[in-house]
Image (cartoon, rainbow, N blue to C red):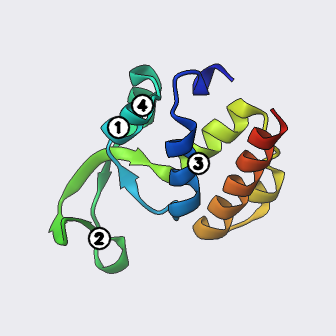
Amino acid sequence: MDVLENVDMSKFKDWLQNSDGYDIVSAEFFTKMGFSKELMTRHTERHYSGEGKYGITTKGKPVEYVDGVYELPFLHDLASRLGADTSKADKLYGRGSSYRALVAATLKTLEVE
């Protein structure tokens, strides 16, 4: 569980339970939570905006792109590193459904410790 060694578990669980998996979040958000800069660098990507529902906004205004951590793949990586059973999430097609399954699997794994 080295990945969570310095993480504020209260903040981590709060993020898990109050996020929807659709957001692109700054790496700083996670480093302030206690995740390593190295891990966040690996998960930080440039995400380009599209049209309509594929558009990215910052503070309510459309932007061309944003650099950040996309919550869904980040949580999938964390769940895998923690040994959580991701099989249910891996079978789902919707991002929200997959994210909720990953949250449940991650929280279940954390309760075991």
Q: Position of residue 99 (x, y in %)?
A: 63, 60
Q: Is residue 20 left or right of residue 101?
A: left
Q: Is residue 9 visible?
A: yes
Tell me if residue 95 comes above or below residue 33 in the rendering.
Answer: below
Contact between marks 4 and 2 (CB within 8 A): the answer is no
Q: Pick the residue in front: 8 or 61.
A: 8
> Within the image, what quadrant is residue 88 found in?
bottom right
Q: Position of residue 8 (x, y in %)?
A: 51, 34
Contact between marks 4 and 3 (CB within 8 A): the answer is no
In the picture of the structure, the residue carrying the numbered disc 3 is 13
Task: Identify residue type, mark 4.
Answer: Met
| Neighbours of disc 2 within 10 Å: few (<14), some (14-19), many (20+) | some
In the picture of the structure, the residue carrying the numbered disc 1 is 27
Mark 4 vs mark 2, CA separation in Å: 23 Å
In the picture of the structure, the residue carrying the numbered disc 4 is 40
N-terminal of the pair, mark 1 or mark 2, is 1
In the picture of the structure, the residue carrying the numbered disc 2 is 55
Q: Residue at x 33, y 44 (%)?
A: 68
Mark 1 vs mark 2, CA separation in Å: 20 Å
